[in-house]
Amino acid sequence: MQSWLTVAFGAFCVVLGVVWAIKPVAMGKLQQQYLYLGAGGDEVQINETLGRVAGLVLAAAGVYLVVT
């Protein structure tokens, strides 16, 4: 049986991952603004690809946490 904390964290990961996959450049800028890390610069194509892949991986991890 899962704890509610695991399910809540998994759901948060799914939501964050989906948003990151849909709007990777905007989420990357937020990451740079608040965390001061991440791929910087004007290489939008690279940042977009990395953001989409990272978002999908995060969403998949969230689904795994919710399902198991």
Image (cartoon, rainbow, N blue to C red):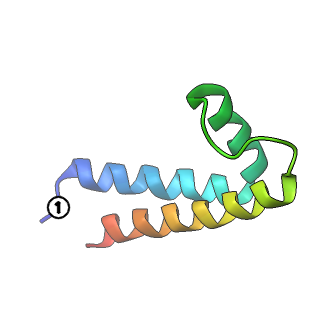
Q: Residue at x 52, y 67 (%)?
A: 57
Q: Position of residue 46 (x, y in %)?
A: 79, 60
Q: Residue at x 30, y 56 (%)?
A: 7
Point out the residue furthest to the left here. Answer: 1
44 relative to 8 in the view: left or right:
right
Task: Pick the quarter of the image with the N terminus.
Answer: bottom left
Task: Pick the quarter of the image with the C terminus.
Answer: bottom left
Pick whichever, 36 or 59, lies toward us: 36
Point out the residue furthest to the top here. Answer: 34
Q: Position of residue 29 (x, y in %)?
A: 73, 37
Q: Residue at x 41, y 66 (%)?
A: 61
22 relative to 7 in the view: left or right:
right
Q: Is residue 24 above or below residue 60?
A: above
Q: Is residue 43 above or below residue 56?
A: above
Q: Quadrant of residue 51?
A: bottom right
26 relative to 12 in the view: left or right:
right
Q: Secondary structure at mark 1?
A: loop
Pick whichever, 33 or 6, lies toward us: 33
21 relative to 15 in the view: left or right:
right
Name the kind of residue labelled 1 in the image. Gln
Q: Residue at x 17, y 61 (%)?
A: 2
In the rendered picture of this protein, how many numbered marks are placed on residues?
A: 1
Q: Residues within 10 Å of mark 1 (few under 14, many from 20)?
A: few
Q: Position of residue 31 (x, y in %)?
A: 63, 37
Q: Which residue in the protein does label 1 denote?
A: 2
Q: Position of residue 49 (x, y in %)?
A: 75, 64
